[in-house]
């Protein structure tokens, strides 16, 4: 059958929904729909009714959004959905694919579902090891694999609410670990005694020293012993809440990255915005710069589409 001229990318996360009509060759986004009805909210709406099955409930929402997408003249189009749509709170649960997985994505489990007489949905599984799971990040990693060495090993960092450190070797992703860095930062900052000593503020180079002080404590496994010092420094030394905010950020990022100080592999960083600057600062504080590769924003932004295109090539015959 070959790769169709266009495909529809479904990026349905826990909190948000996005559909994009994509040119398969250039990966140019031709039209797009976004809503705030994430998988979690959609599942809650499903459980509040009893008329439709879980699969048909999600399919109906997809079809309603597809009607808003400009599909005039589009034929033989496939909709590719990865991530949470294949989870237990999604459209239909698929088993996790067991690591290791190839850079091309052919090892992932997929299932074709007909959601209308004109459109097939290619549902793609997540991936797991014996101690960790992910749904969605593996597609981004597959998309980024074109920029990873095929005959060497290294570690790909995908920072976020639940950061993923994905180890690879000789063209395969072989292991990964999840770090709850972003979620812990939010919980500590909003729901603990430390919240009164923290104030979110825009990044400034003036915060570099306090941030790196936190990084060093985190890298050297002093996170638990250093957290309450934020409160103490606020009371005793009158450290500003804005400084404490970046000290806490440094502590958590340092604790996440600390295991890398014992490694010799190159680290590939894939994140945009302020997190890119913070993670670079942290990494460069204890790893030689020659061992750090930072992807350009455009490469990161198109990684999911590249990964989904690879899935189409591997799974649609």
Image (cartoon, rainbow, N blue to C red):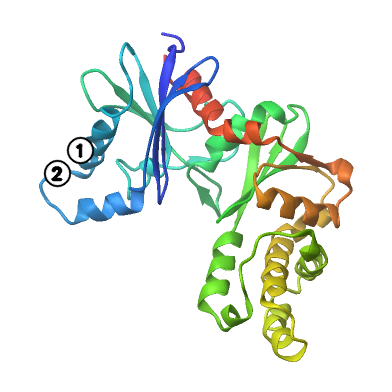
Badge number at residue 122 = none
Residue 41 in picture, x, y percent from top left: 31, 53
Q: Is residue 209 above or below residue 125?
A: below
* Residue at figure coordinates x 75%, y 29% from the top left: 149
Vertical position of residue 16 compared to residue 144: above or below? below
Q: In x, y percent, where is residue 198?
A: 62, 75
State the image coordinates of residue 157 (x, y, percent, origin top left). 67, 46
Q: Position of residue 95 (x, y in %)?
A: 40, 42
Distance CA(mark 2)–CA(mark 1): 6 Å
Q: Dot 1 lies on which element?
A: helix
Neighbours of disc 2 within 10 Å: few (<14), some (14-19), many (20+): few
Which residue appears at 65% of the width and 44% of the height?
271
Are the residues flagged by discs 2 and 1 in contact, CB closer than 8 Å? yes
Instruction: Point out which mark residue 52 bears.
Output: 2
Residue where numbered disc 1 is placed:
56
Q: Is residue 44 left or right of residue 245?
A: left
Using the image as rendered, state which of residue 89 and residue 132 is in the foreground. 89
Residue 103 vs residue 292, the one in the foreground: 292
Which corner quadrant of the image does residue 103 belong to?
A: top right
């Amino acid at each position: 059958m070959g790769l169709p001229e266009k495909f529809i990318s479904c990026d349905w996360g826990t909190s948000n929904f996005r559909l994009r009509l994509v040119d398969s060759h250039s990966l140019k986004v031709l039209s797009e729909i976004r809503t705030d009805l994430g998988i979690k909210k959609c599942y809650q709406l499903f459980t509040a009714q009893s008329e439709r099955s879980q699969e048909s409930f999600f399919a109906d929402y997809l079809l309603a959004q597809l009607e808003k997408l400009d599909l005039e003249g589009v034929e033989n189009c496939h909709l590719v959905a990865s991530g949470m749509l294949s989870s237990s709170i999604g459209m239909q649960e698929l088993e996790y694919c067991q690591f290791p997985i190839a850079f091309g994505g052919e090892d992932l489990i997929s299932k074709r579902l007909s959601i209308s007489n004109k459109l097939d949905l290619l549902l793609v599984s997540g991936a797991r090891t014996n101690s960790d799971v992910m749904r969605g990040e593996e597609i981004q990693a597959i998309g980024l694999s074109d920029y990873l060495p095929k005959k060497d090993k290294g570690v790909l960092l995908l920072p976020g609410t639940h950061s993923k450190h994905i180890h690879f070797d000789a063209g395969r992703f072989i292991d990964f670990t999840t770090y709850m860095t972003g979620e812990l930062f939010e919980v500590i900052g909003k729901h603990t005694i430390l919240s009164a000593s923290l104030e979110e503020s825009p990044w400034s180079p003036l915060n570099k020293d306090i941030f790196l002080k936190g990084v060093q404590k985190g890298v050297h496994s002093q996170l638990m012993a250093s957290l309450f010092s934020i409160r103490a420094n606020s009371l005793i030394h009158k450290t500003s809440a804005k400084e404490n905010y970046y000290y806490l950020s440094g502590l958590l990022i340092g604790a996440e990255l600390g295991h890398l100080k014992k490694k010799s592999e190159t680290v590939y960083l894939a994140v945009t915005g302020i997190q890119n600057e913070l993670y670079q600062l942290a990494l460069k504080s204890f790893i030689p710069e020659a061992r750090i590769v930072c992807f350009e924003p455009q490469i990161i932004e198109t990684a999911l589409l590249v990964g989904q295109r690879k899935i189409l090539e591997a799974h649609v015959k």
